[in-house]
Image: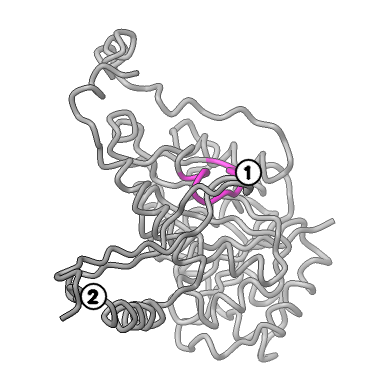
Amino acid sequence: MNILDLFKKKNSGSIAKDRLKLLLVSDRASCSPEIMEAIKNDIINVISKYMEIDAEGLDIQITQTECEGSQGAVPALYANIPIRDIRKA
Amino acid sequence: MSEVIVVTSGKGGVGKTTTSANVGTGLAMLNKKVVLIDTDIGLRNLDVVMGLENRIVYNLVDVVEGNCRMKQALIKDKRYDNLFLLPSAQTRDKSAVSPEQMKKLTDELREEYDYIILDCPAGIEQGFKNAISGADRALIVTTPEVSAIRDADRIIGLLEANGIHKIDLIINRIRMDLVRRGDMMSNDDVIEILAVSLIGAVPDDENIVIASNQGEPLVGNSSAAGQAYMNIVRRVLGEEVPYLDLDSGSGFFSRLLKRMGLN
């Protein structure tokens, strides 16, 4: 390990690499922004039946995850859904 | 057996035309009979990089439309008798030529030339489709940047969908000083992301600017880029050529730092 690496943890080259990896997963899955938006709206509708969520703060994206039984990473749909109130009024 | 090679990238300005000029010239230097075709109709560039802009009479569209014979449109290079350029038309647009016509044209050239190099326009529209229609293999040019690599990935997918599976990557304008301090993706990073075979990396070299100012490709000369391009040419011919140490050429101080593990 390089001595300088101890001081600066994340350099721009590895940021670029990480961004590209995510970008290409969604590019290759040919998931258009319109489809992502539709998925997002459907998720909001379904979850809202059961609890109050922060639709503005909801974030979904296609990323990679390790999966048992398959070689390497597989695409995964990641959703971060902030809950405002767990008990539906 | 002749080979039709398309030089493509998706993104503009990454060095397709410079690469086409240098690979074509390099193949001619190694005694292959070569024709370079500028397929960017409406935005003619390759003639200028080759320094042949004053010799154009007929162009690609003239040949396709039958206004002249192939021989009349081909321009012989200034330095090499076995190197020719088929310039593109400046006053027409992409729709002037169809993929079928391009395929017919490259097949006709196969009879007389060892290598037919197609300089592809940026983008994935008609011009790209024309350029790849007759190609046996592709050289993808990218720079170590997010936007260029993303476009290269798209292009690789489109090439494979069109039955072109012999695809090699050229990483252009790499700066080892930035790679070393972690501010540029390395060759290994780019290959890992694109999952395609590397055929060469060309350092960011001011001699490229000088060469294009003069209209003379620098392949084969003593500059770092000139050597990198000649190595690519040899690999295109199937030779095993070890990779250049792009790290060398740095001064005493950086070598000292490197030895101390600081650089």
Q: Is residue B51 visible?
A: no
Where on the picture, by quarter, is residue B146?
bottom left
**Amino acid at dot 2:** Met
Q: Is residue A53 left or right of residue B139?
A: left
User: Which residue sits at x=24%, y=13%?
Assistant: B253
User: Which residue sits at x=72%, y=82%?
Assistant: B69
Q: Is residue A89 left or right of residue B228?
A: left
Q: Position of residue B52 (x, y in %)?
A: 50, 64
Q: Is residue B230 above or below residue A51?
A: above
Q: Is residue B198 magenta?
A: yes
- In depth, the one of B137 and A11 nearer the eye is A11
- In depth, the one of B230 and B72 nearer the eye is B230
Residue A51, disc? 2
Q: What is the magenta range?
A: B190-200
* Tag 1 residue: B233
Secondary structure under tag 1 reads helix
Residue B20, disc? none
Classify the position of the N terminus of chain B by image quarter: bottom right
Q: Position of residue B220 (x, y in %)?
A: 55, 37
For mark 2, does the 10 Å Cα neighbourhood hold few (<14), some (14 to 19), or many (20 or more) residues? some
Classify the position of the C terminus of chain B by image quarter: top left
Q: Is residue A69 above or below residue A39?
A: above
User: Which residue sits at x=41%, y=37%?
Assistant: B186
- Chain letter of mark 2 equals A
Q: Is residue A84 above or below residue B81?
A: below
For mark 1, does the 10 Å Cα neighbourhood hold few (<14), some (14 to 19), or many (20 or more) residues? many
